[in-house]
Image (cartoon, helix red, strand yellow):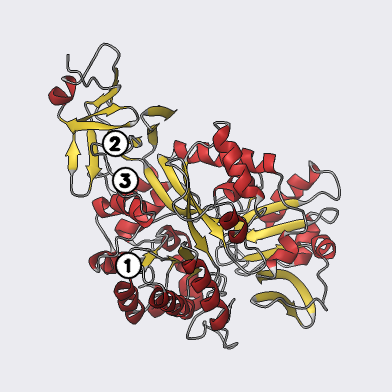
Amino acid sequence: MTAYAADTILHNGTIWRGHAEGTCSALAIWQGRILATGDDDAMQALQGPGTRMIDLGGRFATPGLNDDHLHLMPLGISMGWIDASPEAAPTLAALQEAIRARAADTPKGEWIMARGYDQVKLDIGRHPDRSELDQAAPDHPVVLIRACGHVSLGNSMALDLAGIDEDTPVPAGGVIEKVNGRLTGLVAETAQELLRGAPGAPTVDELVEAAERAGKYLLSQGITSCMDAAVGMAAGFDEIRAYHLAKRDGRLPVRVWQVLLGDPGQNVVDRCFEAGLVSGVGDDMLRVGAVKIFLDGSAGGRTAWMRQPYLGDDGETGVQILQDNQLHDLVLRYHSMGYQLACHAIGDAAIGQLIGAYEAALADTPDPDRRHRIEHCGFATADDNRRMKAAGIYPVPQQVFLYDFGDSYISVLGEARSKPSYPLKTWQDMGFRPATGSDAPVCKPDPWPNLYSMITRKTWKGTVMDDTECVTIEDALRAYTENSAFSQKAEQVKGRLIPGQLADIAVFSRNMLTATPEEILNDTHCTMTILGGEIVHEHA
């Protein structure tokens, strides 16, 4: 028996270790990390009397997936809301019935929350009106949030309780929609805080429960790590406290890389900095990552800030949330404090504005490996890509947006501008090492539509969004593992199944290297998830 007996050995499988390393049939784990990889006979030599043997039975394993942009606590909270997604409520009538059913079980006057609709996918082809929400729940305040999270609707009672009327001033960077002087119930971007803040922030206990609930769901999908894209958005600094309490009490199921909200008026960065919580602080389970600033909205909601107008006669170019001088000052300040930045920019105007702010900050305080990120980065131009590459700025897309929202993009921007969006292969070929994520609860965190969209560029309707940007399944898996780790400065710690890296492993029902895209989308599931060498999820 060798002196280096493994704690656990996985054998008799197809184990994809990483893009460069390829596959093997077995691996050994010791003290939560990969000890060795190879064939079954070689790993058998590392077996000791206490070694746990896991027979994969021919199943396919990869490094644990890393969703590089989602909102963990909001995901957990919204799991208790009405599911307004097109799958659950494809028509206005179905949506109203879901709200009506929830109202029947909710005391009058209590808030009803729903999320996930897309007006393009609704049978009416438009946003619901507040009067239509009133019809479903006249005695309850109702808030309905679009899938993207950048547009919300309130019924009459919700607007009243939020103090929104026809004379309410529109916040800078926001929208309060009126038609012929009448409120429709729609608010967007910064104006959403008036409506969505009215029910009150969740408690610390509720936040811990949400992190635990959402984290367990991620594990069931083979996701062992994630980036929380705006810590502080739901409850300010209480979210920082909730994360640490969850970790202390063993209720944080997944590894979390925290991105701190740095928006004016909602800034948690100053309190974090005072507490010494700067980029890199923490451990492999919970680490402070970057700072986030919102520059614009969503393309499907017509609030992403574009250089050219959306389709239609209104000349609308989206929402510019911050003026150039405001953004430059914020970016320079956070950069000088030592933070990595991961800011939201979808439209080409917002992307260009953010690149300029990053360039200025890096010129003032050079740091060739700060790895500032542009979250989403959907409609970058060729010139934007060249500037990002020159400055060491990284696009961090969510490729599932193409599957869920590609047809919406076409409806508001046209094919020529929409189909080349989120150009994964272009970025890969330029050496950006692009990652991927779900932006859950914007999209469901299940990895299958995300993988499918990367290898086919097809939407849920089958529309092909420029197939020259398709990548291989190996490239798609690399985006979900190695590249996500790189964007979090963790590529030496996780993302590959090689000796010394964390033993975070996802086992799947199907070999995705040989499966068809449709089999990956419709007929693949996670059968086992291992975190730090311990089995944390099993499914037949």
The residue sitting at 49% across, 73% down in the picture is: 332
Which x, y percent locates residue 51?
A: 28, 17
- Whether residue 94 is visible, yes or no, is no
Q: Nearer the viewer, mark 3 or mark 2?
A: 3
Residue placed under numbered mark 3 in the picture: 495
- Badge 2 density bin: few <14, some 14–19, many ≥20, Cα 10 Å: many
Q: Are marks 1 and 2 in contact (CB under 8 Å)?
A: no
Quick check: 424 left or right of 185? left
Please state the horizontal and vertical placement of residue 538, each as a whole percent of the image: 42, 28
Vertical arrangement, residue 180 with respect to residue 514, above or below:
below
Q: Quadrant of residue 143?
A: bottom right
Q: Residue furthest top?
A: 49
Three-letter amino acid code at the position of disc 1:
Pro
In the rendered image, the vertical position of residue 108 relative to residue 151, given as above or below: above
Location of the C terminus by quadrant is top left
Q: Point out residue 343 in the picture as x, y percentages from the top left corner.
A: 49, 66
**In front of the other: label 1 or label 3?**
1
Which residue is drawn at the image coordinates 38% and 63% (left, top)? 370
Q: CA distance from mark 3 to mark 2?
A: 13 Å
Can the viewer see residue 355 in this picture? yes
Amino acid, disc 2: Ala
The kind of secondary structure element at disc 1 is loop
The CA span between labels 1 and 3 is 22 Å
Q: Choose the circle earlier in sequence order: 1 or 3.
A: 1
Mark 1, residue position: 368
Q: Label 3 neighbourhood size at 10 Å, few (<14), some (14-19), many (20+)?
A: many
> Mark 2 sits on what residue?
61
Real-space Cα distance between discs 1 and 2? 35 Å
Q: What's the mark number on residue 440?
A: none
Regarding mark 3 in the picture, which secondary structure is present there? loop
The residue under label 3 is which amino acid type? Gly
